[in-house]
Amino acid sequence: MMKINQPYIPMRTIMTPGPVEVDPRVLRAMGTPILGQFDPAFTNIMNEVMEMLKQVFKTKNRWAFPVDGTSRAGIEAVLASLIEKGDKVLIPIYGRFGHLLTEISERYGAEIHTLECPWGEVFEPKMIIEEIKKIRPKIVAIVHGETSTGCMQPLEEIGKACRELDTLLVVDAVASLGGTNVDVDGWFLDAVIGGTQKCLSAPSGMAPITYNERVEKVILSRKKVERGIATDKDLHTFAHRSIISNYFDLSQLQDYWSERRLNHHTEATSMIYALHEGLRLILEEGLEERFTRHKLHEQALANGIEAMGLKLFGNRQSKIPTVTCVTVPDGVDADIVRQQLLQEFGIEIAGSFGPLQGKIWRIGTMGHSCRKENVLFVLAGLEAVLIRQGVNVNRGEAVQAALDVYSKYAMTV
Ligand SMILES: Cc1ncc(COP(=O)(O)O)c(C=O)c1O
């Protein structure tokens, strides 16, 4: 018989912008027994997940539930359920994930309109609003926190304008939800997608979404009955649908998450346990307290990086607290530094994409990874590796600068 060893899983300090370290409570929750998906003990957990998600999204929307699959599954479910062939979709792009919105929308037949600004900047809301007035799109799809550049687009003005102009605003809040404010109702966001593997401190594999009645109206209008064979009860299984995807059909998914519990897919029980525990952790900590924690560690990290003599990438005014981008010094091989950090220290940081590949490192401060010991360790490790690469850094300054931030904060609480 072939003998296959158990895989070796090393201990890591994960400081990428996702996936991040999973809270031990989440891991424990995932190890609890499987329940059948219609078992009342399980559907009760589903109901609690919905209620907690509404609090984290800051919404009174009826619908807030996870789509099974990675974060792009949530994005695709929203876009697939809204876009009909030829619909105009406006996508302001300021990094890699704006391109993802474009690619998905294109696949569902949208007439795409894009706006672009340099990576490391965000849009002046007026620029987007002018474009909405000109194009009159059915949907504006935009990223809230661009993990590829560490920038965050203010959404409130755009949200208001979309509401006034009767455009649906779809927001990718994958990198921001649970780490910094995402005010779904206050900012007039119509559909919002988060990610479990970032600030929710759970593994990758689920995409929490929420959407309002404006979105639901469009989705339900696409639920057409063919040849009159479907009764209301059967509608779920027999109706002809104009939504192309079965897996991403939100009209079916919301039936499954409703009291009717109409069967769609087999629910990923252990991931629901994970999400439930991740959300419980957030609400126990308190949303505002959690945002303050993310800001604090971001500040310590950013000050440490600058004290070392390195430069932060991107417009600081538009920086997201959950991702810090660092310009790779001239003559340094970005990948070798990342490899050495991993090999020598067990620390993982990320590179970037497209025009920023090899030019910046991206360091996450997200969810359970966003802790003092992690920030101090990544600063110390990065400094040591850069010294070994012959870079002239300010030795010993980075950790001290971060410690200064922590002691200053300790005096205020
Ligand atoms: C802002 C943003 N949107 C979308 C995604 C896609 O998520 P996934 O890789 O989980 O499908 C990511 C992943 O890093 C992201 O950072």
Image: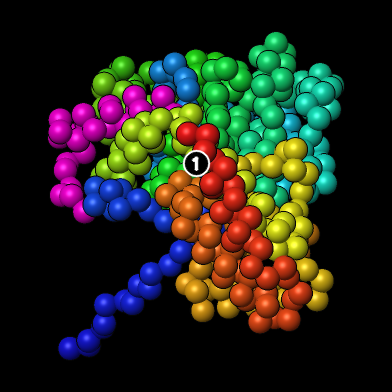
Q: Residue at x 60, y 32 (%)?
A: 171
Q: Position of residue 256 (x, y in %)?
A: 31, 30
Residue 6 lies left or right of residue 195; in this view the side is left
Q: Position of residue 241 (x, y in %)?
A: 46, 29
Q: Position of residue 303 (x, y in %)?
A: 67, 52
Residue 231 lies left or right of residue 307; in this view the side is left
Residue 318, above or below 227: below
Q: Position of residue 41 (x, y in %)?
A: 15, 33
The magenta stretch spans which residues? 31-56
Q: Residue at x 76, y 58 (%)?
A: 311
- Seen from the viewer's position, the closer of residues 120 and 317 is 317
Residue 348 lies left or right of residue 150; in this view the side is left
Rendering quarter of residue 55: top left
* Magenta stretch encompasses residue 51: yes
Disc 1: which residue: 410
Q: Quadrant of the N terminus?
A: bottom left
Rendering quarter of residue 266: top left
Residue 44 lies left or right of residue 81; in this view the side is left
Q: Residue at x 63, y 55 (%)?
A: 401
Q: Residue at x 28, y 48 (%)?
A: 25
Residue 347, above or below 323: below
- Whether residue 318 is visible to the viewer of this picture, yes or no, is yes
Rendering quarter of residue 54: top left
Residue 106, above or below 8: above
Question: Under tag 1, what secondary structure?
Answer: helix
